[in-house]
């Protein structure tokens, strides 16, 4: 996956509870998501399961979330990682090969 960071990170980035939040990086599997976040530059990464839940709780303030599933960096096991459903708020473990949405975070 080829990502041009200048087109992804817009002036509208928000900071919430000490985390800067990227714009939506698109649909990708978990391994692609890890790489895409790192390609954004120093400190960018997938949010942990708890951080992703915080983003969900503040989704209206942050903006730009689809009513869909988003990857976290928290692994359930070797084959699954935690996701958060941004329509209902539930968190589930899911196969890392499936494509879900990605938002990166870094300390602000």
Image (tube, rainbow, N blue to C red):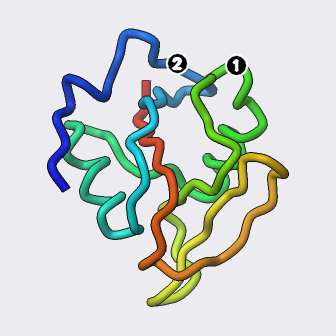
Q: Which residue is mark 1?
A: 61
Judge whether 35 appears above or below 37 on screen.
below
Return the x and y of residue 66 as percentages of the image width and height.
Answer: 63, 40
- Determine whether the residue tagged by mark 1 lies in a helix, strand or loop: helix
Q: Kindly indicate the quadrant of the structure image that contains residue 9.
A: top left
Looking at the picture, tell me which residue is in the foreground, 19 or 83.
83
- Determine whether the residue tagged by mark 2 lies in a helix, strand or loop: strand
Return the x and y of residue 28 as percentages of the image width and height.
Answer: 39, 60
Q: Residue furthest top?
A: 11
Return the x and y of residue 41 as percentages of the image width and height.
Answer: 20, 37
Looking at the picture, tell me which residue is in the foreground, 22 or 27.
27
Placement of the C terminus among the 4 image quadrants: top left
Q: Which residue is mark 2?
A: 14
Q: Kindly indicate the quadrant of the structure image that contains residue 23.
A: top left
Pick whichever of labels 1 and 2 is earlier in the sequence.
2
Quick one: label 1, few (<14), some, or many (20+) residues within 10 Å? few
Judge whether 78 appears above or below 54 on screen.
below
Q: Residue at x 63, y 56 (%)?
A: 69
Quick one: label 2, few (<14), some, or many (20+) residues within 10 Å? some
Say if mark 1 contacts mark 2, CB within 8 Å.
yes
Return the x and y of residue 50 as percentages of the image width and height.
Answer: 67, 53
Q: Residue at x 19, y 23 (%)?
A: 6
Measured in 3D between alpha carbons, the distance from the residue under mark 1 to the one under mark 2, in whole angstroms, is 8 Å
Placement of the N terminus among the 4 image quadrants: bottom left
């Amino acid at each position: 996956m080829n990502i041009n960071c200048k087109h992804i990170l817009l002036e509208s980035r928000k900071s919430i509870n000490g985390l800067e939040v990227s714009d939506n990086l698109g649909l990708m599997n978990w391994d692609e998501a890890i790489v895409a976040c790192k390609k954004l530059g120093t400190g960018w990464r997938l949010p942990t399961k708890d951080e992703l839940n915080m983003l969900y709780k503040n989704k209206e303030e942050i903006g730009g979330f689809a009513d869909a599933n988003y990857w976290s960096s928290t692994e359930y096991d070797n084959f699954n990682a935690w996701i958060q459903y941004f329509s209902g708020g539930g968190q589930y473990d899911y196969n890392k090969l499936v494509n879900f949405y990605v938002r990166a975070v870094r300390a602000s």
